[in-house]
Amino acid sequence: MKKKMLVLVSLMLVLTGVLSACGKSGSGSDQTFRMNLTSEPPSLDVAQAQDQVSFTVLSGLFEGLTRMDKDGNIVPGVAEKWDISEDGKKYTFHLRDNAKWSNGDPVTAGDFEYSWKRTLDPNLNPPAPYAYQLYYIKNAQNHNIKEDNPDHIADAAQVGVKALDDKTLEVQLENPTPYFLNITAFFTSFPVHKSAKDNANWAAEAKDYISNGPFKLASWKHGDSIELVPNDNYWAKDEIKLSSVKFSMVKDANTELNMYKTGQLDWAGAPTGSIPPEQLDKFRKENNKELSVKGIASTYYYNFNNQKKPFNNVKVRKALSMAVDRQAIVDNVTKAGQVPAYGFVSTGIHGVSGEYRSEVKDDYFKEDVTEAKKLLAEGLAEEGMTSMPEFSLAFNEGLHKNVAEAIADMWKTNLGITVKLELQEWKVFLKNRQSLNYDVARAGWGADYNDPMTFIDMFTSKGGNNDIGFASPEYDALVKEAYSTNDQQKRVDAMAKAEKLLIGDNQALMPLYYYSSAQLVKPYVKNAIVDYSGNVDYTRISIEK
């Protein structure tokens, strides 16, 4: 990344199989790739997307200034090259002459400036949840945050991103940022076509959709399917072998697996589908050649609504967390090699000289039912309550119900608590979580770039993805401290203190396990990439039957 470009975690997984007897695909072979999304993408607007389903579709539709190659290195995307100032605070990107939108218009530096400033617009409705990913840019945060901000900058022209001409984009940063080039490969940094200015619903239907990536949106049958076809105007169209990408929206894991077995899907499982745990366990024991299971830089956890009684009490939150047997969950419920989590930053993330999780131990709390009972009684008494009221545990489609049932049973057995389980449709679930309309809710977070900050800055007081209602001036100050230095030891020290404050001191959320990525892939699917955080890059796939 950056001048000396940190190498992203080499948990990159290139999924290749043995060629079938027919050899490589010929010009007449079917170059269609089929996988399951489980649910409808809540948004295909790059300023509004915040979930894995939306990101998976967007990764084929758009390209940023940079992108990641199969080895996890940052390589040129729309920008063919860039210059970085000696102090690491100014980036000048030079765009390709042949970068075009799917409608044939040239992709300009102004398209990036417009997109980024649109995301940062304090009046954008709804607000962009990932706006904070652009706070590294000079004046971006003070422009985006308007409410209760005496330093608010109303003039967007003062934000440090400017198109010097159609092919030159200048970006001024607040501080040197070791991973800024990775940010320019992330979804929030994608450009938006100028036509969006006059069409608020530009991302709602296929007919209005203009993108700049390897594929374009051919059809979007809401609640049913999405189809992508190659973008003939893409600058590297010769690298694209697929004739189409077809996404289904099947909620049931058993149905998804059956579709894979009967040849209706070429890919089943993560990142947007799932394999029934019992079948996954069976495939692992059989050493199924089509199954791949790898640890990824992602954390599965439960949100506590820190603003709602009695979850506003730290002792109640700690009691609920300490009463859960994480090893039993990964051994008996999820069954995919997940690792119990006692911190928030996942495994597979860079620290100072090695992995963060090796350098900063996740020993912020221990499971202890006796202590949990004591803390629960004390916490409830502090809130003027004699017993824990029945509360709701919300989750979305997929295998999250299995985990929720196991945890509800542990809370019932260990603490005598009654929990109401609520299965919610994905889009509704996200909206409820973001608006703090829940008691406890399942959540998961995958790394957006390879640095602990991708986990830590989520929970600043005004963070767009802070959906637990946690607010701490001390936490905010530690994040600001880590932002302000290029000294990796000082950065990691500040982030470790922030993580301790979040988990050890406040138990603001309940870590459960560090994810693994499990998928079944047909042997004729070549050159698919699952990156260090579990995202799939299908753009360079070929079908070799």
Image: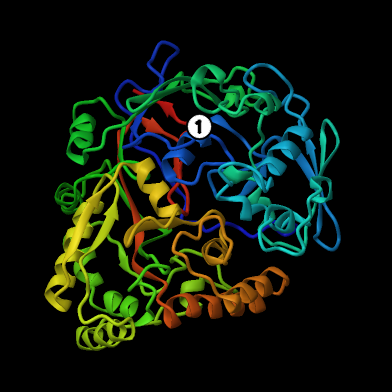
Looking at the picture, does residue 112 appear above or below residue 198? below
Q: Residue at x 42, y 36 (%)?
A: 41
Q: Quadrant of the C terminus?
A: top left
Q: Name the residue under label 1.
A: 539
Q: Where is residue 418 in the image (x, y as percent from the top left)?
A: 16, 67
Q: Which residue lies furthest to the left in this view?
A: 413
Q: Is residue 66 visible?
A: yes
Q: Position of residue 489 (x, y in %)?
A: 64, 78
Q: Position of residue 292 (x, y in %)?
A: 31, 48
Amino acid type of the residue that numbered disc 1 sits on in the rendered structure? Thr
Q: Residue furthest front?
A: 384
How many residues crowd mark 1 within 10 Å: few (<14), some (14–19), many (20+)? Answer: many
Q: Which residue is drawn at 45% across and 31% down?
A: 541
Q: Residue at x 28, y 86 (%)?
A: 381
Instruction: Looking at the picture, tell me which residue is in the foreground, 529 or 506.
Output: 506
Looking at the picture, does residue 439 appear above or below residue 118? below
